[in-house]
């Protein structure tokens, strides 16, 4: 009976993945960390924000090639509007969201420019409604917001991983805690001293790949390419409330990280596993 229950649970999860989300989003890989909005969502694992847009042809242009073209244009505008609304709510750190940073003219210009260049990944026309799906990269959002961050990542020399290094990365298990993913966060020891964050990483590596990968499958995370061959796997002690973005790990794990012969933090070799 237990085997049947396990299979049924797996089948149910598979069917959920195969079913349409908001009618247009693409199939996702099992284990992706998703944050869903009404017309958009963020895939923290794959590093993109995806949205949908819809429009109909003008009343006097129905059932004409020009009407179809105008409907597509309207759907893209709706897509861009939905992306912008969703992006504003993306959490940058424990205290702020993208909306807080978009009062900065540079950040606002960069974000809106990225949205105007949205990659269209799917488009359909049923004769009445034109629907489009498109995505923008989290990498572009990091590039937009980084100049306005109060704490700046610096350019650091990236040394090759020496042979025989025991700790090649960090996997933090927070499946038992209500973690909120964010573009930047801190890992602290039990006394509140920072173990990992923007000050530890190379700026170019951060811009390209972010501070971490987010996954839901611990077994996969332990063997993910990002953390290489011998990651340190730790279970989080708690989150720093009330925002639940920053993570506290045991002092014993923090000590191992600080004494590692190779500093994997520079290259952002960190994975966070959440439910």
Image: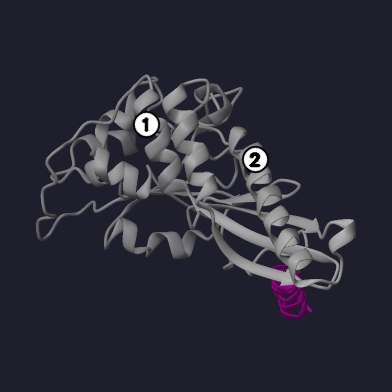
In this picture, residue 103 sits left or right of residue 223: right
- Would residue 8 be counted in the magenta stretch? yes
**Bounds of the magenta segment:** 1-19
Give residue 250's position: percent from left, percent from top. Answer: 40, 34
- Would residue 75 be counted in the magenta stretch? no
Relative to 213, does residue 263 appear above or below in the rendering?
Answer: above
Q: Main secondary structure of the magenta part?
A: helix
Q: Judge whether residue 21 can be spotted in this image.
A: no
Alpha carbons under labels 1 and 2: distance apart: 19 Å
Q: Secondary structure at mark 2?
A: helix
- Residue drawn at the location 42% of the way across and 45% of the way down: 140
Say which residue label 2 marks. 86
- Residue drawn at the location 15% of the way across and 55% of the way down: 165
Give residue 5's position: percent from left, percent from top. Answer: 77, 74
- Residue drawn at the location 54% of the way across and 45% of the way down: 115
Q: Which quadrant holds the N terminus?
A: bottom right
Q: Judge whether residue 158 can be spotted in this image.
A: yes
Residue 146: which numbered mark, if any? 1
In this picture, residue 270 sits left or right of residue 103: left
- Image colouring: one colour
Give residue 110's position: percent from left, percent from top. Answer: 44, 36
């Amino acid at each position: 009976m237990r085997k049947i229950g396990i299979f049924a649970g797996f089948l149910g999860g598979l069917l959920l993945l195969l079913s349409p989300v908001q009618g247009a989003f693409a199939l996702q890989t099992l284990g992706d960390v998703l944050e869903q909005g009404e017309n958009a969502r963020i895939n923290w694992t794959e590093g993109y924000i995806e949205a949908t847009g819809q429009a109909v042809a003008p009343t006097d242009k129905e059932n004409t090639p020009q009407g179809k073209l105008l409907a597509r244009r309207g759907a893209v505008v709706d897509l861009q509007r939905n992306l912008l609304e969703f992006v504003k709510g993306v959490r940058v750190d424990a205290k702020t969201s993208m909306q807080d940073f978009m009062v900065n003219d540079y950040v606002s210009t960069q974000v809106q420019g990225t949205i105007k260049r949205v990659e269209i990944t799917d488009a359909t026309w049923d004769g009445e409604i034109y629907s489009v799906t498109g995505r923008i990269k989290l990498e572009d959002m990091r590039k937009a917001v980084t100049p306005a961050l109060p704490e700046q990542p610096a350019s650091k020399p990236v040394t090759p991983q020496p042979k025989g290094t025991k700790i090649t990365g960090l996997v933090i298990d927070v499946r038992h805690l209500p973690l909120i993913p964010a573009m930047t966060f801190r890992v602290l020891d039990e006394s509140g001293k920072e173990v990992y964050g923007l000050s530890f990483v190379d700026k170019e590596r951060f811009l390209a790949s972010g501070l971490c990968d987010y996954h839901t499958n611990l077994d996969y995370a332990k063997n993910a390419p990002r953390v290489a061959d011998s990651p340190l796997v730790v279970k989080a002690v708690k989150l720093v409330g009330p925002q639940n973005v920053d993570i506290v790990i045991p002092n014993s794990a923090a000590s191992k990280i600080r004494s590692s012969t190779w500093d994997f933090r520079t290259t952002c070799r960190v994975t966070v596993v959440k439910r």
